[in-house]
Image (cartoon, rainbow, N blue to C red):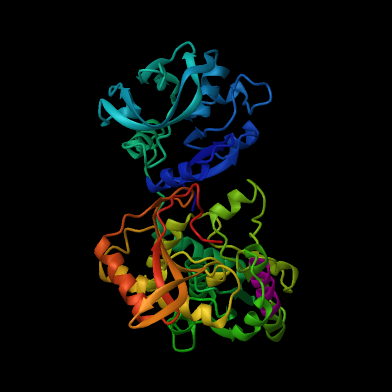
Amino acid sequence: MKHELVIVLDFGGQYNQLIARRVRECNVYCEVKPYTMPLDEIKALNPKGIIFTGGPNSVYDEKSPHIAKEIFEMGIPILGICYGSQLMSYTLGGKVETAPVSEYGHTEVEVDTKDVIFDGVSDKTVCWMSHTDYISEVPEGFSITAHTPVCPVAAMAYPEKKLYATQFHPEVMHTAEGMKMLSNFVYKVCECKGDWQMASFVETTIKELKEKIGDGKVLCALSGGVDSSVAAVLLSKAIGKQLTCVFVDHGLLRKNEGDEVEAVFGPDGHYELNFVRVNAQKRYLEKLKGVEDPETKRKIIGEEFIRVFEEEAKKIGAVDFLVQGTIYPDVIESGLGKSAVIKSHHNVGGLPDVVDFKEIVEPLRMLFKDEVRKVGLELGIPEYLVFRQPFPGPGLGIRIIGEVTEEKIKIVQEADYIYREEIAKAGIDKGLGQYFAALTNMRSVGVMGDFRTYDYAIALRAVNTSDFMTADAAQLPWEVLAKVTNRIVNEVKGVNRVMYDCTGKPPATIEFE
C-alpha cells in the first residue's frame, strides 16, 4: 500500500527525526532524506510536501549545505525551518546576515493569523528560537508573516508558490502551537488526507512478510524489549512455527523480567513460535569480574551475547532470515540511505558476522518508538510489555557504577522494583518518559536502629521527554519520593541512603554510564 509522503531534507539539524515524528503524528507518512538527494529522485517519490531542517551553518558560507534553485520550481509545497528558512531566502534572492541580537530559547512571536500556516494560532505565541543569523530581506514575492522585536522575519510566505518558512522550530515541544502549524502545512498546504494508520501498517506488513519468507526458517534475537517483542509477534502472525526466538538472560535484567518474557513468548504463552531461553547469568558475571570501566562493560556484555547467540544458532542449524528490531532512529543515526548499523550497546550488534543466514528482515525499520508501541497494541501484546520502560542492551550493567557483582545486581533489582511499584501506585507512571533506580559506587555512614552502618547509596532517576534527545528531570511528588526512600532503606539490604537526580539532558545523559 502506497502512502502519501512528506520528505524531510536534512541539512545537519539536530531535530531532523523530531520533524518526521511530528508529521507522522498528523497521520501523514514522512521520511528523512539527505539534502544531497538528486532532484529527479525526489520527484520520482512524488512527495506531497518537503520540509527543510535547521542546521549549524551560515548560508552565506560557501562550504555550507546548499540546494539547487530548481527545487522551488517543482510545484511541491516546501516549508523551511531555521537554517532551512534562511536557505530558502538566500537561494531565491533574499538577504541573510549575522543577527545584531541572537535569539535562543522561549520567545514570544507575533504572527499573521491570516497566513495559512498560522490559521487557528494565537496572535502572539511562544516559540523556540535558536539562531545567530537572520533574514534581513525577504526574496521577491514573499511577505513577512511573523516577527519578534529583534527578528524582523520570524516567518515568511509565498502562498502562490506554496513556499513557507519559519525562523523558529515548530517541531519542538517548547513551541506552544507548533503542532498546529505543522498540521496546517501538511493538511492545508500539502492537501494530505492522513492515510498513515497503524492498523493498516500491521495488516500490510504481515501480508508482505508471508510473501517474502514463504516456507523459510527465521531466527530472532529476542530481548523482551518493545522493539524485538513487536518484531517477533509480527513474524509469529505471519509465519508461526517457522520462527525461532532466542532469549539470552544475562542476569542483568530487572526483577522477574526473564520470567515475564518467558510467560509471554514461551510454550505457555500467547504466540505460535519456537522459544529458546538461555540462562547465562553465571557466564556473564565471570566475564565482568573486576571490570569497572563503563565502555569495557558494554563491550563485554555485547560480545558475550554474540557468543551465546552463536552457540544457540548452531544448534538450530542454517536459517533463511535473521530478524532485527531495527527502528527508524537507528537507520537515521547510522547514516541516511545506508543499512542500519547497530550500535555497540544494542543486543543484536554484530550478529550478521556469526550467524549463517541469507537475508536480514527488519519489519520495524521505518517506525519511530511511539509508532512501534502503537503496533504492539494493535497486535494485542500485553500493555505492560508495550509500555515497558526503555531498557539499555547492557541492562543493569550500566546502572551499577563500577564492578558488577551478584550482590549489587540484587540490590539494584530490589530498589528499582520498589521505585517502579510506588510510581505505578501513585498513578504517575504513564506521564514519565523514563524512570529507574541505579546503584552508585558511593558508600556512606548511616544509623539503623542502634547500629552504625556503612552501606551503598541508591540514586533515583525520572525524566520527562518526548524524544529522548533532550530531557528534564521530573518533579516527582515529595510524598512519593519519601515513601520510596523509606521502603528502599528498610527493605533492601546494603542500602542506607537514597538520592534523587535532578539533572536534565544535557548536561547529563539519561542513563548513568
What is the quadrant of the C terminus in the image? bottom right
Displayed quadrant of residue 432: bottom left
Identified at 50% across, 47% down, the residue is 507
Q: Is residue 237 visible?
A: yes
| In the image, residue 105 above or below residue 356 | above
Magenta segment? 298-309
Q: How many marks?
A: 0
- Residue 286 drawn at (x, y percent): 67, 82
Q: Is residue 354 left or right of residue 398?
A: right
Of 439 and 33, which appears nearest the observer? 439
Of 490 and 454, which appears nearest the observer? 454
| In the image, residue 160 above or below residue 24 | above
Q: Is residue 271 visible?
A: no
| In the image, residue 66 above or below residue 379 | above
Displayed quadrant of residue 404: bottom right
Is 380 contained in the magenta span?
Answer: no
Identified at 52% across, 38% down, the residue is 8
Q: Is residue 336 left or right of residue 14?
A: right
- Residue 325 drawn at (x, y percent): 56, 65
Identified at 40% across, 64% down, the residue is 499
- Residue 31 drawn at (x, y percent): 53, 45
Of 91 and 408, which appears nearest the observer? 408
Identified at 56% across, 84% down, the residue is 274
| In the image, residue 151 above or below residue 298 | above
Which is the main secondary structure of the residues drawn in magenta? Answer: helix
- Residue 378 drawn at (x, y percent): 38, 66
Is 305 contained in the magenta span?
Answer: yes
Q: Is residue 488 left or right of residue 124?
A: right
